[in-house]
Image (tube, rainbow, N blue to C red):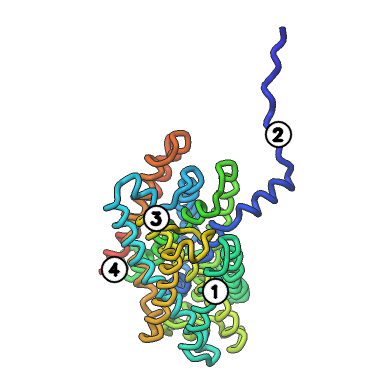
Amino acid sequence: MSISPPPRTPRVPSKARWLIFLGVLGPGLVVMLADTDVGSVITAAQSGAQWGYKLLALQLLLIPVLYVVQELTVRLGVFTGKGHGELIRETFGAGWAWISVLGLAVATIGALLTEFSGIAGVGELFGVPRTMSLTLAVVFLLAVVWTGTYRRVERMAIALGLFELVFVWVALRSPVDSGAMVRGLTEVPWHNGGYWYLVAANIGAVIMPWMVFYQQSAVADKKLRPDQYRYARWDTAIGAVLTQVIMASVLIVAAATLAPAHSHAPLNTVGQIADALTPALGPELGRTLFGLGILGAAMVAAIVVSLAVAWGFGEVTGYKHSLEHRPLEAPWFYVMFSLGVIGGAALVALVPNLVALSVGVEVMNALMLPLVLGFLVTLAVRALPPEHRLRGAYFWIVLTIVILTTGLGVYGALSSL
């Protein structure tokens, strides 16, 4: 009597795999485009202006770090179907959940101030009054979220974020000194507090609390299934490379145009960055390109940050929190989103030049890493189904990366004092 072999799993055609990937694509790409926000652009510009190419290696090293961190949010979202705040509440209790979401709120306030300051700065570049540009931005953001499904909001965020690619084009046009770049990749001013301050700022500009909350909640809201996990990881990997290429491009432009002349031009506003970094392009083209890049970065980040805090508070308090619900079905979710958008714009309208705080906001993010990444790794060990938990060699790799990144960020922030 012969025994038939077990049936083979049918092979998915390559065209079908591409269609599945395109359907999954979104949460990782959106959160990574938002990662290169106004504060991150200013941090990268100041890094290149002050230290040339000496912080370029850090931008490249942060690609795998960013992927490892955000892949954990994908894993948690796919295999539990729950957002970050909800999972913390179920695993550690309401007290720890409130601590995590209050930390998220602090990071959100800092981020929104920089995003709306960037929007106001772009308006002023073209002679638009601050109040008008902020009002238009608020109306647009509220209209996108209040009238759209998750998928529509995601597509709009991607379209806005892709304007950031102008930074890459500007970098390709910059007068890069290859010899200076090679030297910068190997020289580290170990004993300089100012250097370590920007190390901390760059780490905080890449790994932010609202990114963890947003991507896990977006994966859950999009209802990605376990069989789509591999495609969601590719979405995250592509986004991680893209955001760091954009950050590196801004740094390279600043290093190529400002560092050789030992320029001490301030880089605290959109206008100052455009004037300082694009002289070879001419004032009009330079301002237009940087204006588009900053506007795209600010708008996609404002959507992501505000949604992250709305999701986070919804997951902790238990109110309905999904873009698939209409405003009357989930009123508190839309109220929290609206408060973030309107409140951030109002503060920027009343207090000018808050974008100068951008680097300090990123350093604050670095100081919050022990809490944020501590929760993330512990959830990946305890809250996942046993077959998907961190274990074995990969667990030790992730733990080592998290400890080194957290330690470097905190050390850089404290040593600068």
Decide: few, some or many residues near mark 2? Use Cα within 10 Å; few <14, some 14-19, many ≥20: few
Q: Are marks 4 and 1 in contact (CB under 8 Å)?
A: no
Residue type, label 2: Pro
- Point out the tag, 3 or 2, that comes first from the N-terminus: 2
In the image, 93: left or right of 225? left
Disc 3: CA contacts within 10 A as few (<14), some (14-19) or many (>=20): many
Say if 127 sits above or below 164 in the image.
below
Q: Secondary structure at mark 4?
A: loop
Q: Which residue is mark 3?
A: 315
* Pick the front one: 390 or 91: 91
| Disc 2, SS | loop
Q: Which residue is mark 2?
A: 10
Disc 1 marks which amino acid? Ala
Circles 1 and 2, Cβ within 8 Å, touching? The answer is no
- Mark-to-mark CA distance, 4 and 2: 57 Å
**Quadrant in which the C terminus appears:** bottom left
Q: Between residues 168 and 204, which one lies in front from this camera angle?
A: 204
